[in-house]
Image: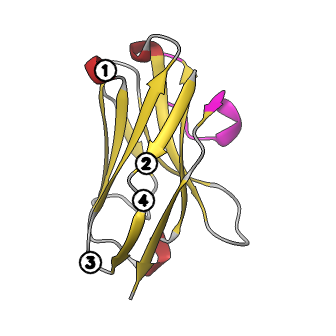
């Protein structure tokens, strides 16, 4: 499975961005997906996750109510809609995937990773 993350950029606090994660190589609807982020000097942290077909979702407390994870299995693509961005959201964002029915939230539970996309939020 190959994952390609895109959609990052530089925005002002309060703005929005939509990240995409295009998957190829294996049936997308068999993959649970997640988004993680890593800021300079910090460990990679969980942001959001979604199950493979039912659409069950889970969010980190820090993004709950502002971020929305979704997927379009017909287009083999996952999304992370990020609203009301804050400076503390600045990080490299990674999408990840694993063959699983439910969602996971720990990085080592995922087998496939995208290359990361930079999100910079200035206050």
The magenta segment: 100-112
Q: Is residue 54 visible?
A: no
Q: Give the residue at mark 2.
A: 6
Tell me whether circle 2 and circle 1 mark residues in contact (CB < 8 Å): no
Residue most toward the bottom? 123
Q: Is residue 17 above or below residue 72?
A: below
Residue 91 relative to residue 65: left or right: right
Q: Quadrant of the C terminus?
A: bottom left
Q: Residue, x 47% and y 43% (percent of image)?
A: 5
Q: Give the residue at mark 1.
A: 73
Q: Give the residue at mark 3.
A: 14
Q: Residue, x 39% and y 15% (percent of image)?
A: 29
The x and y percentages for residue 44 are 66, 56
Q: Nearer the viewer, residue 93 or 33?
A: 93
Q: Comparing marks 3 and 4, which lies closer to the viewer?
A: 4
Q: Comparing marks 4 and 1, which lies closer to the viewer?
A: 4
Neighbor class of circle 4 (other Cα within 10 Å; few <14, some 14-19, many 20+) is some
| Cα distance between the residues tagged 4 and 2 | 6 Å
Task: For mark 2, give the secondary structure.
Answer: strand
Tell me whether circle 4 and circle 2 mark residues in contact (CB < 8 Å): yes
Q: Give the residue at mark 4.
A: 8
| Cα distance between the residues tagged 2 and 1 | 17 Å
Q: Residue, x 62% and y 68% (percent of image)?
A: 39
| Cα distance between the residues tagged 3 and 2 | 20 Å
| Cα distance between the residues tagged 4 and 1 | 22 Å
Mark with earlier residue (3, 2):
2
Q: Nearer the viewer, residue 98 or 58?
A: 98
């Amino acid at each position: 499975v190959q994952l390609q993350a895109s959609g990052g950029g530089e925005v002002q606090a309060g703005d929005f961005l939509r990240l995409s994660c295009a998957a190829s190589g294996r049936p997308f609807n068999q993959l649970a997906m997640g988004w993680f982020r890593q800021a300079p000097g910090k460990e990679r942290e969980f942001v959001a996750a979604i199950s493979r077909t039912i659409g069950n979702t889970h969010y980190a407390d820090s993004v709950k109510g502002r971020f929305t994870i979704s997927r379009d299995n017909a287009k083999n693509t996952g999304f992370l809609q990020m609203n009301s961005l804050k400076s503390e959201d600045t990080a490299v964002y990674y999408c990840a995937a694993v063959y699983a029915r439910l969602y996971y939230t720990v990085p080592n539970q995922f087998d496939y990773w995208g290359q990361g996309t930079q999100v910079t939020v200035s206050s």
